[in-house]
Amino acid sequence: MTNEKIITADKLSKRFGDFVAVNEISFEVCRGEIFGFLGANGAGKTTAMRMLCGLSLPSSGEATVAGFDVYRENEKIKKSIGYMSQKFSLYEDLTVKENMRFYGGIYGKSDAFIKQKTASVLEQLHLQKEANKLVRSLPLGWKQKLAFSVAIFHEPVIVFLDEPTGGVDPVTRREFWHMIYQAAENGITIFVTTHYMDEAEYCNRVSIMVDGNIEALDTPSALKQIYQSASMDEVFLKLARKATRADG
Amino acid sequence: MRTLKFLLQKEFRQIFRDPSIIRLIFIMPVMQLMILPWAADYEMKNIKLGVIDHDHSDYSRKLISTITASGYFILNDYAATFNQSFSEIEKDHSDIILEIPASFEKNLVKQSEATLFIAGNAINGVKANLGSLYLRTIINDFNQTVRMDWIQVPRFSPETQVEVRSSNWFNPLMNYKYFMVPGILVILLTMVGSNLTAMNIVKEKEIGTIEQINVTPIKKYHFILGKLIPFWILGLFVLTLGFIIARLVYGISPLGSFVTIYIFAGVYLLAVLGLGLLISTYAATQQQAMLISFFIMMIFILLGGLYTSIDSMPEWAKWITRFNPVSYFIEVMRMVVLKGSSLYDIRKQLLVMGVFAVVLNGWAVVSYRKRS
């Protein structure tokens, strides 16, 4: 981890009519960091993430991702980021290999790169035998790991993961986090939202959003100290109970 | 360019792996072209006739047998009174009543003149109208025969007679299949073009892959071309399949050149693909897309001149048909297939279709946003 800033957000806000989904949040993420973005359902995590990915236009505030401005240079941002949404978003009617080839191709990677990278990813996931099977036929845990591999296939500077381990068994979750650590070691910055507080402990720093605001931002150990809690679970509950916004 | 290659590769793989699309593009044209032209016929047959013969004479029987021998009428009831016959109409068993008065033969012989009464059930207006028209024609013919029997026609007939002989140009046998098949081909192409495209893009919205595409550096026009090109090719394939069926089953091959048809079809497909694209940008689910395109297709077909002639529509409806791409293609199709019109003859329609393609696609491109 270096001190180079990969994401900066300054009073970033998103309003839908009268509803303030994200209220002037400010934070910075450094290169190679695993940044946990926590919050209850409807706290505004996904909206904030979508603004950083260039999927949603901010209402006000400033933000840069990989050195590019989210307002003017959002197409440049897209070249430097990977994204894995809540919904599983590989093509189920394409094979494992074809999905990799497609996503590699649309990021402008060469055939040689795609071929070599496909081989190494298949090896890492132990999916060599399933390479020519339709993604539809894989179990959910494998699909999620594959989706993550495809999200970083083009070797982005930063990858955004929106609740990547939803509905996945504990063993696969552990394996998934192993993959995240490996990616971080390779210099990819990880920006991850999650509901699992044990996963929050794996992060270098976490921020906790409540009703569109960032209520806390620090390392997990520092947060536990500040809120005099034994686990991140308690920290989260203490903060999230303040929420007045309805679920959803 | 390379990006487009990857998009097309993906799209074609998905199309060929989707059994429902394959079924749709093969079975839909075959079914529609095999069944519809036989069922959709403007000629009225099997008109159920009720007869009240008060005369029971030689001539009245001759008249009745002439009518039933024509093939258009089925003698449903032979009643004694009008009321009996009318109750058949009320039960919807009869379509038309012919009443022959008691003095029919006598009047015909003595005064060379007799009256008949025809009553039609106008709930089905077309049937009643055509039925009484056919009946009148047959009675007229009968009339002529009777005259010939009686009157020795002198060299210069004192009575002037105007005889009308008609010949039907471009479709001499008035075969309705010639008229329907080109129109059905157009409807097929429209369905493939707009429905499949709209459903395809909305499906990506539903499963969330479109969001994945939106976070990539893919250019908007790449994505749209990647969607348009496969369905454009698919549309031309369906058209070709349709022409093969038209040839094999109905012996219809265009009098004009295929080049003219394919040039127009190419531009037409661009327009309807643009429409599909536009629907997809406004619909969030496949259900919504389906309902919107169903609604549009209804209007397109009913105001397209396939079943009813545009010329007989009221002025305001004619005005609407000018915004209906289907009506132009049906017109062009019939012109080229039946009349052998050339590219020069359809230049106006081609130009209008070009405008449709530009406007619809332009609108779709503007309303498709990678960022909300």
Image (tube, coloured by chain):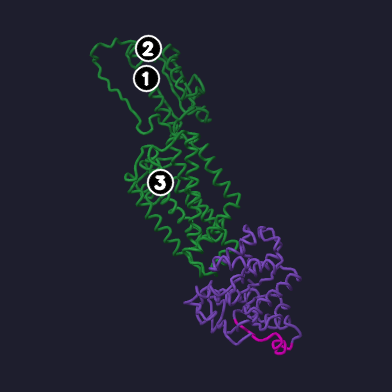
C-alpha distance separating marks 2 and 3: 58 Å
* Distance Cα–Cα, label 3 vs label 1: 41 Å
Q: Which secondary structure, mark 1?
A: helix
Query: Residue A130 placed where, x, y %?
Result: 69, 60
SS for tag 3?
A: helix
Eye-nearest disc, 2 or 1: 1
The answer to whether B72 is drawn above or below residue A209 in the figure is: above
State whether discs 2 and 3 lie on one chain: yes
Which of the marked residues, 2 or 1, is nearer the chain's N terminus?
Answer: 2
Q: Which chain is purple?
A: A
The three-letter amino acid code for the residue at tag 3 is Phe
What kind of residue is marked 1?
Asp
Q: Nearer the viewer, residue A146 or A83?
A: A146
Residue bounds of the magenta highlight: A213-228
At label 2, which amino acid type do we have? Lys
- Chain of the residue that carries numbered disc 1 in the rendered image: B
| Residue A44 lies in the magenta-colored region | no
- Vertically, is A242 above or below B95? below
Local crowd size for mark 2, using a 10 Å CA cut-off: few (<14), some (14–19), many (≥20):
some
Q: Residue at x 63, y 72 (%)?
A: A162
Residue labelled with disc 2: B106
The numbered mark at residue B141 is 1
Which label sits in the foreground, 3 or 1? 3
With A41 as the anchor, is B363 left or right in this view? left
Q: Chain B appears what colour?
A: green
* Residue B60 image offset from top left, x and y in percent: 43, 15
Mark 3 or mark 2, which is nearer the start of the sequence? 2
Q: In the rendering, at what x and y percent does residue B111 appear?
A: 32, 13
- The label shown at residue B329 is 3
